[in-house]
Image: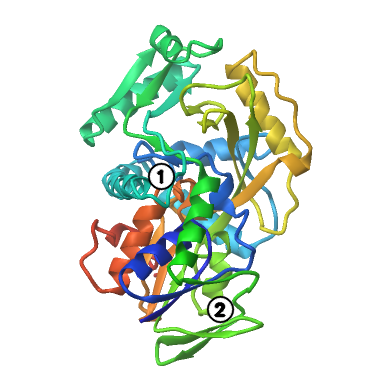
Amino acid sequence: MEVVVIGGGIIGLSSAYFLQEAGHQVTIVDQSDMTNNCSYGNCGYICPSHFVPLATPGIVKQGLKWMLNSESPFYIKPRLSLSLVKWGLQFMKEATAEKVERAAIPLRDYALFSKKLYADWDALPQFEFAYEHKGLLEIFQTEKVGEHAKHLVHQAHALGLTDTKLLNQQELFAMEPNHQINAIGAIHFGCDGHLYPNKLMQQLIADLKNKGVLIKTNEAVVDFEKTAGKINAVITPHNKYKADAVVLATGSWSREMAKKLDMDLLLMPGRGYSITIEDTPYQTIYPSVLVEGRVALTPIEGNKMRFGGTMEITSTNEPPNLKRVAGILKAVKSYYPSFEIPVPTIDKVWYGYRPCSADGLPYLGRTKKWKNLVMATGHAMVGLSLGAGTGKLVSEIIDEKPTSIDISFYNPERFNH
């Protein structure tokens, strides 16, 4: 079968990997040169701990407060946009305690499945992407967040993530003894791992090329050849690619791509930023999330530190905003007072767009409108974590095999009325 995968991020590459392994002839088409998309600059977490989706009850109220502060962790850039309004209204509708609770088991299963596949890849000779399994710290400064942390640990244990532990201040300091930390405690999620996204992406691309997957870069998809509920070809300005099946894995550009197929996809780009510093004295032992600051830190390969964060709901055409990076570094310093990291120049900053669905859960599966189309997008902040698992699930869907986990929760048409 000839399968065209649109999108060369971790979701597209993983899909191509497992489709090729299943015996399909695969072509990846991407509008960029595939060297710097959102799959490169994230903090590299493989995180079953992230069983709470983006749309939570408190985030809407908090987001409205933060809208006045361009340095805030969650920021919706006000603009006249019907698609933003539709997405926002659905997001508010989805942000309920009941829906968050219902999402926990499906997200746990998805992440554990994906984590196993990353471990499988790590054992292969062609891959060496600095995969480590030492867990993740969620560090907090306030009693209010500490109370929530107790609930989260209890919930993790109920989900079978029993290597999750609530740490008091002394236990936290013992795990991170090299720097003073302004915090009262942390959760240690022993279930989590991390890797170096840049290496993973480069090695996946090299492996796919070696196996005969055709990779077409700098080709934007402009149209489709369609008949009787089926996509027959994917059209770019330069070529037409025949397709028996199509995988739409275009990340934050998926709403526009879906529109070319006469579908309305509730999805917004959420821009994040990161900076990576080599040979820095500001090195932590564990990857960590600074909870109140909503910032992530990752030690990578022994000599690098990556600092990342923010969720800026904006358009993909909006220029980057260094105030967002200043906000990240200010949050880091509030936890680690000895960390003297100046705001870098824009050329030293990575930024990319996370595809955020209207409930923070992925869109994964077939559509009623196009019988040979599989959607694989909308993974928000856990695209890398769920990447390997998504690729395997895509290949199972295309081969019409029973899927390794229940994917009904991720129906791409769940908001269609």
Toward which corner of the image does residue 336 lie, by quadrant?
top right
Q: Residue at x 46, y 61 (%)?
A: 13
Toward which corner of the image does residue 228 lie, by quadrant?
bottom left
* Percent position of residue 24, x then y: 36, 76
- Is the C-beta separation of discs 1 and 2 under 8 Å? no
Q: Nearer the viewer, residue 303 or 144?
A: 303
Identify the image quadrant of the C terminus: bottom left
Q: Circle 1 sits in a helix, a strand or a loop, which is it?
A: loop
> Eyeballing the image, is 197 above or below 148?
below
Question: Which residue has dot 2 on it?
Answer: 260
Q: Is residue 187 left or right of residue 397?
A: right
Q: Circle 2 sits in a helix, a strand or a loop, which is it?
A: helix
> Eyeballing the image, is 308 above or below 211?
above
Amino acid at dot 1: Pro
> Eyeballing the image, is 374 above or below 360?
below
* Percent position of residue 21, x then y: 33, 67
Q: Residue at x 24, y 58 (%)?
A: 406
* Percent position of residue 57, x then y: 43, 40
> Eyeballing the image, is 378 above or below 323?
below
Identify the image quadrant of the N terminus: bottom left
Whether residue 278 appears in this view of the structure is: yes
* Percent position of residue 118, x then y: 36, 47
Question: Which residue has dot 1 on it?
Answer: 53
Which residue occupies the extreme bottom position in the image?
227
Whether residue 415 appears in this view of the structure is: no
According to the image, what is the colour scheme of the structure? rainbow
Toward which corner of the image does residue 191 lie, by quadrant?
top left
